[in-house]
Image (cartoon, helix red, strand yellow):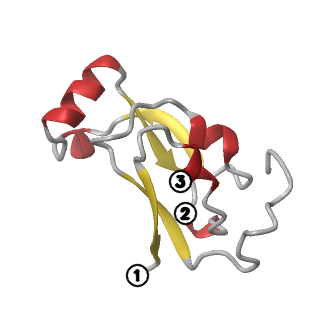
């Protein structure tokens, strides 16, 4: 269920680009959750596997908040870029689907 109508600059088809979250930069501010018209983000505790890949900056951020932004279904992304613009830590970028 969308929080709002899709933005006019969204890709009509979707699934061509996906958001990539840099867990070293993500501070779990939840801005991406609030702005995504396709409800692609959720905040949840970082997994053991993802925690193992963190650098010092990421470990410090995770010490204060153990949650990170995870994607619920990246294939539903319509590349509007709202998440990229909303993230205060610049932890999200859009990348081509492999």
Residue 32 screen position, x and y as percent: 58, 43
Query: Which residue is denoted by mark 2 in the rendering?
Result: 74
Residue at 81% across, 60% down: 6
**Callout in the foreground (3, 1):** 3
Q: CA distance from mark 3 to mark 2?
A: 14 Å
Task: Look at the numbered disc 2 and give the secondary structure of its residue.
Answer: helix
Is the Cβ of the residue at disc 3 closer than 8 Å to that at disc 2?
no
Residue 48 screen position, x and y as percent: 24, 39
**Callout in the foreground (3, 2):** 3
> Circle 3: is it few (<14), some (14-19), or many (20+) Cα within 10 Å?
many
Residue at 32% across, 44% down: 23
Give me the disc on residue 34: none
Give me the disc on residue 84: 3
State the image quarter where residue 80 is shown: bottom right
Q: Is residue 93 left or right of residue 65?
A: right
Quadrant assignment for the C terminus: bottom left
Q: CA distance from mark 2 to mark 1?
A: 12 Å
Q: CA distance from mark 3 to mark 1?
A: 19 Å
Task: Look at the numbered disc 1 and give the secondary structure of its residue.
Answer: loop
Residue 95 screen position, x and y as percent: 44, 71
Is the Cβ of the residue at disc 2 closer than 8 Å to that at disc 1?
no
| Residue 41 vertical placement versus 93 (above, below) | above
> Circle 2: is it few (<14), some (14-19), or many (20+) Cα within 10 Å?
many
Residue at 71% across, 55% down: 38
Give me the disc on residue 98: 1
Residue 75 screen position, x and y as percent: 58, 69
| Residue 87 vertical placement versus 12 (above, below) | above
């Amino acid at each position: 269920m969308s929080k709002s109508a899709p933005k006019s600059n969204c890709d009509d088809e979707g699934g061509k680009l996906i958001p990539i979250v840099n867990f070293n930069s993500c501070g779990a501010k939840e801005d991406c959750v609030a702005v995504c018209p396709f409800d692609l983000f959720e905040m949840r505790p970082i997994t053991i596997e993802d925690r193992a890949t963190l650098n010092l900056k990421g470990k410090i951020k995770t010490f204060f908040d153990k949650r990170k932004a995870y994607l619920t279904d990246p294939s539903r992304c319509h590349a509007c870029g709202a998440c990229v613009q909303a993230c205060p830590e610049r932890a999200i970028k859009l990348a081509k689907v492999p």
